[in-house]
Amino acid sequence: MLLLLHVLIVSLLSSGSARVVQNFESECGQFFANGKPPTQFLDPKYRKICQTLNNNGPYYATFYDTNNKIPVYSAFKFEGLKDCERLDKWYIEPQLDDNNASPDMKLEKDVKKQGLGDYQALNKDYIKSGHDRGHLAPVYQAQSQSCADATFTLTNAAPQNSSFNRGQWRVLEEQMAKNLSDQCLPKNYTVYIVTGVVPGNNTINNRVNVPSHFWTAYCCLDNNNKCQISGGFIGVNENITPEEKPTVMNLEIELAKLYKVASFELFDSSTEPPAKKPKTQK
C-alpha cells in the first residue's frame, strides 16, 4: 500500500513538470482533438515537448526537429481573446541538450552545459540574421498571461521573414482568433489549433533552418467529437498573403507533398464531417 502511494505521489509530481516526453497522447494529449496528435515522423532527431514554464503547465505541445533546430509544429487549445502582454526574453529547452537537465524551459544564462545548442537554436543564431523569431503558438491566441509567456521559447519559434511575421502572418493570427471567438466559442465548441513550418533550403548562422512555409489549421470540436468548423492556411515565408485552404484535407494534401511523405494528418480523422469554415469578417 505504501509503495503504491509513493508511486502515485511521484506520478502526480512528475505530471506537473514540462519535459521532453516519449508519448504525446499520455503526457499532453489535451492539446489534440480527441487526444490524437498530428502526424509524427519516426526519426530520433524529432523530439516531443510538453511546454511548461516555472514548473506550471503544460500550456501547449511542440514536435521539434533537433537537426534543423526548428519545430515541426506546436499544438494548443484556443479559449478566447485574453489581451496578453508580450514577454521581452526568450527561453530554451535544457533537456534537448542534456537528458538529465531540469524538466522546464530556462533562460540560456541559467543553463550550464558544455555543447549547449547542439540540438536547438540559441538567441545568438538570430542576431543580425535578418529574420524574426517567429512564434508557432502565438501570444495573441494564448489562453492566459502565463501561457503567453511560455510561448517565448526558441523551441516554439522558427526564422521568419520579418515583414511577413509583423504583417500578413500577424493579421492572419488575429483575424483567425476573432473569427473563432465569434463562431465557435459561443457554441461551446472546443477549439484546437496546430501551427507549423516546412523546412527550407537556407539557414541562419549556418545552424538553424529557415522554413520555406508557415502553416496553421483549426478544428472546432462539438460535444460529439466532430469538427463542425475547420480550415487552414499556408504561406510562403515571404511578405505574401497566406493562402486559405477550402478544407483541412486540402492543407493536409499540400503538406504531405512538401514534407515528402505519403500522408499528413492534422486532426484525428474521425473528427472530420461537415468541416465548415468560419465566415470571413469584413
Image (cartoon, rainbow, N blue to C red):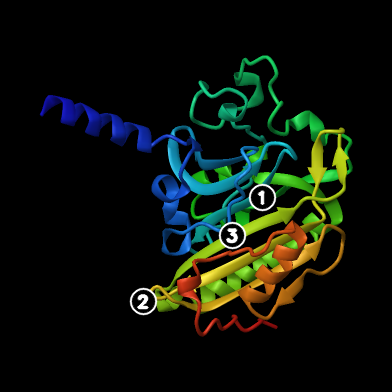
Q: Which quarter of the figure is the N terminus placed in?
A: top left
Q: Residue at x 75, y 40 (%)?
A: 68
Q: Tell me how far mark 1 sits from mark 3, CA to CA.
A: 10 Å
- Residue 237 lies, with reference to residue 207, above or below; the image says below
Q: Is residue 171 at least partly visible in the picture?
A: no
Q: Secondary structure at mark 1?
A: strand
213 horizontally vs 91: left or right: right
Question: In this view, which residue lies farthest toward the front?
Answer: 262
Q: Residue 67, located in which quarter of the rendered image?
A: top right
Q: Residue 123, located in which quarter of the rendered image?
A: top right
Amino acid type at mark 3: Val
Q: Position of residue 116 (x, y in %)?
A: 68, 22
Q: Which quarter of the figure is the C terminus placed in?
A: bottom right
Disc with the residue nearer the chain's start (1 vs 3): 1
Disc assigned to residue 248: none
The residue singled out by tag 3 in the image is 194
Q: Residue at x 58, y 52 (%)?
A: 40
The residue singled out by tag 2 in the image is 224
Q: Position of residue 77 (x, y in %)?
A: 49, 59
The residue singled out by tag 1 in the image is 72
